[in-house]
Amino acid sequence: MIDKDNLWIVIAALGLGSFGLRFVFLGLVGDRALPPWLLRHLRYTAVAVMPALVAPLVVWPAANDGQPDPVRLSAALLALAVGYLTKNIYAAMGTGGAVMLGAAYLPGL
Amino acid sequence: MSRDTIRSAYLRGMRGGGPFILVVVPFAMMFGVVATKAGLSLFETLSFSVVVIAGASQFTALQLMGEDAPTLVVIASALAVNLRMAMYSASITPHLGPLPLHKRALAAYLLVDQVYAASILDYEARPRQSLSEKFAFFLGVATPICPNWYLFTLVGAWVGEAIPPGTGLDMVLPLAFIAMIGPALRTRAHVGAALSATGLALLMAWLPYNLGLLVAAMGGMVVGAEIERRREAT
């Protein structure tokens, strides 16, 4: 069983630490200009972090015992393609969701 | 700056954050259930989600505490899982940096994966927004996400049962992000960054504490920046 004194230490430390990580640039750099080379890298943070976040989840889904699953892979690739072509987030999400639901409820798939 | 512009930016943000309710609700409930099973009271469970507001690191901390890991190890491991937040902070600074300190502090507190992703993509797609519009959009995205994180942590703790991990529910989170990646791939540099980050994430997935994500993201950023630099040089 989890020790309650330690629990509050952990909650407080994680709260401060997580806030610190989120505040470190936004709070301390603020309005000061960042060097151009850094700005150039930061322009690609979002398009690099998001695929890195989801790639292992899609390729080795825990719900499928970590084994690649053709349905999940197709849902992901189709959602990506539709998002890229239509530039529409909802169309992309709907496509991926439709593949998952279709595979679950259509017989013979 | 007219009130209508701010209001419409806020509403646009809410629409951007809306789909993530589907991600946040099951994840928050699961945390509530796991925390209660580990012996935490309702108040402790809710405090955890409100103070820390970072799902993956909350699960890590809980699991390690359950295994009686030393407190410093628990804290260090759970914070390692959150290192990507410093990258979010840096990446959003050129947009929100001019805000007054208390607003930057609020934005930092709310800077979770989904709020970051939806906001930064909007700022890049519509670079001509004013500072107040950007901040309103940011708060709009956080509105359906963060309060639901608290609320459904509580619901999970209360009900004691998570939404069953049935048919493909695990794909809601990846699909929500993938749907945002497609429209964000506007140049060859974006595509290069995304492809190399994907490859690296798969190659480095064996690293502990989510560090593979960090390596992959940095690798992708370097590739994107380098493609941009070479294109400008020619």
Image: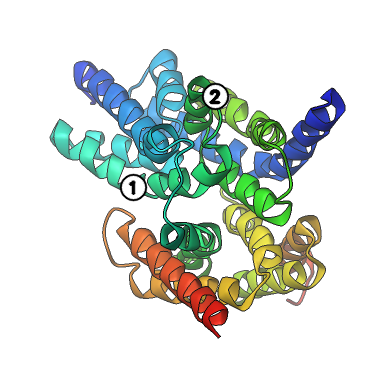
The front one of A107 and A52 is A52
- Residue type beneath disc 2: Lys
> Can you see residue B164?
no
Which residue is tagged 2? B103
The front one of A98 and A31 is A31
Q: Which numbered tag is attached to residue B81?
A: 1
Is disc 1 surrounded by few (<14), some (14 to 19) or many (20+) residues within 10 Å?
many
Q: Residue at image x 36%, y 38%?
A: A21
- Residue type beneath disc 1: Val
Q: Is residue B7 above or below residue B63?
A: above
Q: Residue at image x 53%, y 67%?
A: A58
> Can you see residue A31?
yes
Residue found farthest to the bottom: B234
Q: CA distance from mark 2 to mark 1?
A: 25 Å
Q: Residue at image x 44%, y 16%?
A: B42
* Left-right relation of B31 to A106: left
Where residue A13 appears, x then y in whole percent? Answer: 27, 26
> Of marks 2 and 1, which one's residue comes earlier in the chain?
1
Total numbered labels placed on residues in the image:
2
